Image (cartoon, rainbow, N blue to C red):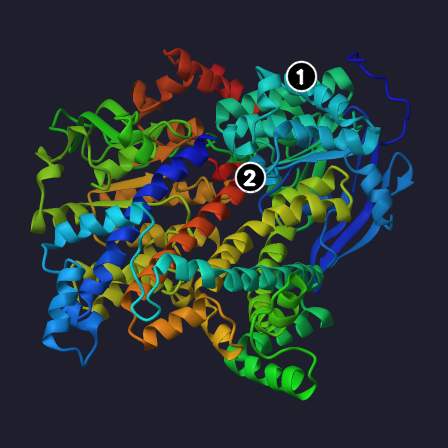
């Protein structure tokens, strides 16, 4: 409990830092932020209007106070393109992305654990070599290429899966997002397998495993009760980083499969120079990363007593 | 239950007959035969690589699958080699148990120690989890852990080294095995803790009739508690017999070498210098070194000051030019902090270190470089303190050209002279650390330290990672060098025997303070302070040494 409190207080400082950086982001763009927001072809009057409307004529610190105050009330700006609050936009686009992330996790984690165990059981065996070879191939294939190929083959060619959209019902979602989730998982599984395999092999020869054997523990018990819990920790941390990355980084997959998620929103807003949305998304991605890391830390502490400070 | 157990079987408990072990083409064990009788404590002595651990792991079936074992091992008339995995599992922890050198790495870091002690009982005796837990608490009490109910809920990292070893012992004896194999059980522990663990093993042997195979490199320990000792070398038993005979009348030349190499057997008086009232070369005055406690954001918000840890507190000492002074203490006593303070790696919170009367804290620039040249250090771990990518010659030459005392080419030729001085063959100069043995690496470390022709040499536990025979050779070398080069030596060690045979004066450290000081021989033979007495009492002397010191 004490650990949770301690971490939460640390989080407040991290979040404050994130606020400052996202605020400065617009101001660090070279040139006049008002001009940047207004776009290349805006007239001087428009720029002046924008300057006043966004309070850009005020001193920097005052702008920040307003910005921070708005954040507290949940207002992270207005989209120029959609003419809607950024919060509402994100609220609309976040669900496909979260669904996709959850889908990827469900598709990636069980095979990762199974393959890592199969591979680590006898390092250097045929199964191990095969898993490692396919893993390297899976990592080496670019996600966008795999996405396009699978979309052509299974979607257009065989007609098994829809090639775009998100669907209406839960079953629809599963059907629509299968190919995007699979092409992401194909890249994620080898990364997880490599990390877990290395840790399993290392822990399998640890001193406490010899000690457990000397106390009469069977090989099965040693593996499930001693080796696996000790080996899972580094992979858990890697997994957290990957998940945080997925929430912010499904841009390619979402674009290829036209999933109406945050990645699509990000691309569209960037192309349309909708800076308030970009700023809002950046803030959101940063906060999710922090939140996921926090959850992973709590999970590690639950497994490893040494992580509880 | 706790009374002496009369052996039911009259034959040997463990019978090892003509066992050989090979890994690929290397034979690590050659035709080893020995027996352990019920209720007996047998010592297995030998240096690293002698095969003493291999034979015991072989008897427990714990060798890796790449090991090829031939011969016969019988436990209570049951042939062990060739048992299936399930039969082995039923035997291990139930009839024969094992404890290890490093208790910290042999406990599962993720489980409460109570659970780890309970597991063998759940496994072998069919106890329920709560019954086993209750018994685990009682076992913790039996092995001398205070507040056992609370300690059972601790995780390994919350316990000290000695307590961890007691937990290992509790888990090992939980199912009342007949044989305990103890593989260097006290090597990683402080001497006072070592004495207590050995006492515990003796008690278990007496009260429960537990037969013990005690593996150790320390003949003193074995002589103290074993009835029989066997000496191993290069995978063979070179000699076995009654403990007294092995120590007092060793037959085999290697046993004799081993006995003579035991710390404290030989006095290294060469180069001891009588000091005549000159000003001391190195002076430490009222030195206090403090490490700040950990402080996080919550503490800052609550204005809570972390409690700083004083590694050294009010230490005064003076060392004359040419003197050899020993610093003795257990782990955490502040001896290494002192060494680091002298070479200005730890900044004192108060007090000063003076070299030739001038405080080293104020040195800067050229004077600081001069201090680095005049005071050199040799480190504990011979491998970690050498750059793995440099050859021995390059390692020794580096300080010479770095200090601008010669260009690189003449530095290398000076280095080869230094190599000769530390008695290393010139051919080894081209080797990298991992191609050298521990003792050879330590010689390279000494040569590197001497390359700058320092006045003061600090040796921080330089022999504690080495075998006893190697340790004796390194001490011999150092004794010769200090005579030839008029070195002032600060010799830091946990081993009071080594220090008293090698140093003129000693300072005994405990918890950052000096508890006793004086001539080495006096401190060893008639310690004044309670702590020093405890330290001396914890030493395991060979019987002959005791007689010698009585005869004076």
In-front residue for pair B184/A307: A307
Res. A302 mark: 2
Above or below for B166 versus A142: above
Residue B207: image x %, image y %? Answer: 74, 15
In-front residue for pair B248/B59: B59
* Subunit bearing disc 1: B
Label 1's element?
Answer: helix
Q: Is residue B34 left or right of residue A92?
A: right
In-front residue for pair B131/A10: A10
Observer able to see residue B26: yes
Circle nearer the viewer, 1 or 2: 2
* Subunit bearing disc 2: A
Instruction: State which quadrant residue B526 falls in.
Output: top left
Above or below for B222 versus B382: above
* Residue at 90% from the left image edge and 22% from the top image edge: B8
The CA distance from mark 1 to mark 2 is 31 Å
Res. B243 mark: none
* Residue at 70% from the left image edge and 40% from the top image edge: A212
Residue A58: image x %, image y %? Answer: 10, 55
Callouts 1 and 2 close, C-beta under 8 Å: no
Q: Which residue is mark 1?
A: B142
Observer able to see residue B541: no
* Residue at 8% from the left image edge and 51% from the top image edge: B366
Q: Is residue A107 left or right of residue B547?
A: right
Residue B60: image x %, image y %? Answer: 76, 42
Q: Are marks 1 and 2 on the same chain?
A: no
Q: Is residue A13 left or right of residue A53?
A: right
Residue A244: image x %, image y %? Answer: 46, 58
């Amino acid at each position: 409990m004490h650990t949770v409190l301690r971490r939460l207080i640390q989080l407040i400082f991290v979040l404050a830092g994130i606020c400052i950086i996202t605020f400065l982001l617009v101001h660090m763009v070279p040139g006049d932020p008002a001009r940047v927001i207004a776009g290349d072809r805006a007239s001087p009057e428009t720029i002046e209007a924008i300057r006043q409307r966004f309070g850009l004529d005020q001193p920097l610190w005052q702008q920040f106070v307003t910005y921070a105050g708005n954040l507290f009330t949940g207002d992270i700006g207005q989209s120029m393109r959609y003419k809607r609050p950024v919060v509402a936009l994100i609220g609309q686009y976040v669900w496909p992305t979260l669904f996709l992330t959850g889908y990827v996790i469900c598709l990636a984690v069980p095979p990762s654990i199974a393959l890592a165990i199969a591979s680590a059981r006898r390092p250097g065996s045929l199964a191990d070599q095969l898993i490692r070879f396919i893993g390297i191939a899976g990592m080496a294939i670019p996600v966008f290429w795999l996405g396009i190929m699978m979309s052509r083959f299974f979607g257009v060619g065989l007609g098994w899966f829809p090639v775009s959209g998100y669907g209406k019902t839960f079953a629809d979602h599963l059907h629509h997002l299968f190919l995007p989730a699979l092409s992401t998982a194909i890249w994620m599984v080898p990364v997880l397998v490599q990390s877990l395999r290395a840790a399993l092999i290392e822990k399998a020869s640890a001193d406490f495993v010899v000690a457990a054997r000397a106390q009469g523990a069977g090989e099965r018990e040693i593996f499930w009760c001693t080796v696996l819990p000790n080996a899972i920790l580094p992979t858990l941390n890697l997994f957290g980083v990957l998940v945080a990355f997925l929430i912010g980084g499904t841009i390619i997959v979402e674009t290829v499969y036209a999933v109406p998620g945050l990645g699509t929103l990000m691309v569209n807003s960037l192309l349309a120079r909708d800076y308030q949305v970009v700023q809002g998304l950046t803030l959101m991605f940063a906060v999710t990363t922090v939140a996921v890391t926090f959850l992973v830390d709590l999970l590690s502490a639950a497994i490893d007593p040494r992580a509880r400070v | 239950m706790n009374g002496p157990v009369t052996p039911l079987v009259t034959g040997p408990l463990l019978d090892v007959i003509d066992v050989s072990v090979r890994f690929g083409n290397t034979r690590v064990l050659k035709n080893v035969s020995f027996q352990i009788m019920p209720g007996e404590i047998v010592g297995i002595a030998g240096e690293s690589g002698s095969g003493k651990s291999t034979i015991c792991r072989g008897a427990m079936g714990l060798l890796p699958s790449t090991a090829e074992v031939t011969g016969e091992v019988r436990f209570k008339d049951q042939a062990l080699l060739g048992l299936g995995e399930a039969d082995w599992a039923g035997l291990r922890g139930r009839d024969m148990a094992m404890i290890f050198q490093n208790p910290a790495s042999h406990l599962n870091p993720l489980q409460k120690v109570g659970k780890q002690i309970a597991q063998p009982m759940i496994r072998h005796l069919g106890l329920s989890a709560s019954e086993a837990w209750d018994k685990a608490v009682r076992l913790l009490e039996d092995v001398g852990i205070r507040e056992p109910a609370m300690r059972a809920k601790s995780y390994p990292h919350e316990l000290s080294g000695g307590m961890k070893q007691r937990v290992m012992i509790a888990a090992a004896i939980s199912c009342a095995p007949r044989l305990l194999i103890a593989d260097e059980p006290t090597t990683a522990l402080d001497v006072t803790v070592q004495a207590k663990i050995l006492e515990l093993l003796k008690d278990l042997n007496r009260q429960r009739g537990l037969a013990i195979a005690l593996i150790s490199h320390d003949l003193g320990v074995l002589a103290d508690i074993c009835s029989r000792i066997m000496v191993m070398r290069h995978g063979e038993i070179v000699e076995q017999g009654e403990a007294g005979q092995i120590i007092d009348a060793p037959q085999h030349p290697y046993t004799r070498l081993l006995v003579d190499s035991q710390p404290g057997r030989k006095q290294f008086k060469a180069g001891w210098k009588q000091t005549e009232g000159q000003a001391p070369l190195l002076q430490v005055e009222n030195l206090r070194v403090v490490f700040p406690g950990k402080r996080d954001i919550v503490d800052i918000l609550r204005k809570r000051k972390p409690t700083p840890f004083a590694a050294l507190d009010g230490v005064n000492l003076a060392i004359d030019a040419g003197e050899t002074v020993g610093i003795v203490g257990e782990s955490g006593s502040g001896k290494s902090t002192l060494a680091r303070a002298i070479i200005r790696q730890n900044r004192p919170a108060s007090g000063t270190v003076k070299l030739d009367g001038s405080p080293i804290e104020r040195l800067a620039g050229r004077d600081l470089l001069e201090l680095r040249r005049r005071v050199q250090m040799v480190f504990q771990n011979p491998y970690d303190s050498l750059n793995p990518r440099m050859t021995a010659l390059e390692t020794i030459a580096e300080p010479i050209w770095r200090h601008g005392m010669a260009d690189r080419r003449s530095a290398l030729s000076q280095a080869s002279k230094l190599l000769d001085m530390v008695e290393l063959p010139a051919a080894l100069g081209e080797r990298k650390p991992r191609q050298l043995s521990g003792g050879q690496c330590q010689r390279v470390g000494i040569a590197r330290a001497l390359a700058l022709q320092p006045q003061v040499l600090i040796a921080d536990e330089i022999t504690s990672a080495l075998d006893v025979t190697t340790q004796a050779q390194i001490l011999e070398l150092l004794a010769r060098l200090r005579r030839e080069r008029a070195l002032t030596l600060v010799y830091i060690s946990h081993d009071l025997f080594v220090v008293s045979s090698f140093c003129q004066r000693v300072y005994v450290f405990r918890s950052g303070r000096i508890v006793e000081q004086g001539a080495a021989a006096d401190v060893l033979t008639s310690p004044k302070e309670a702590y020093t007495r405890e330290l001396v009492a914890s030493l395991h002397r060979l019987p002959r040494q005791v007689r010698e010191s009585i005869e004076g």
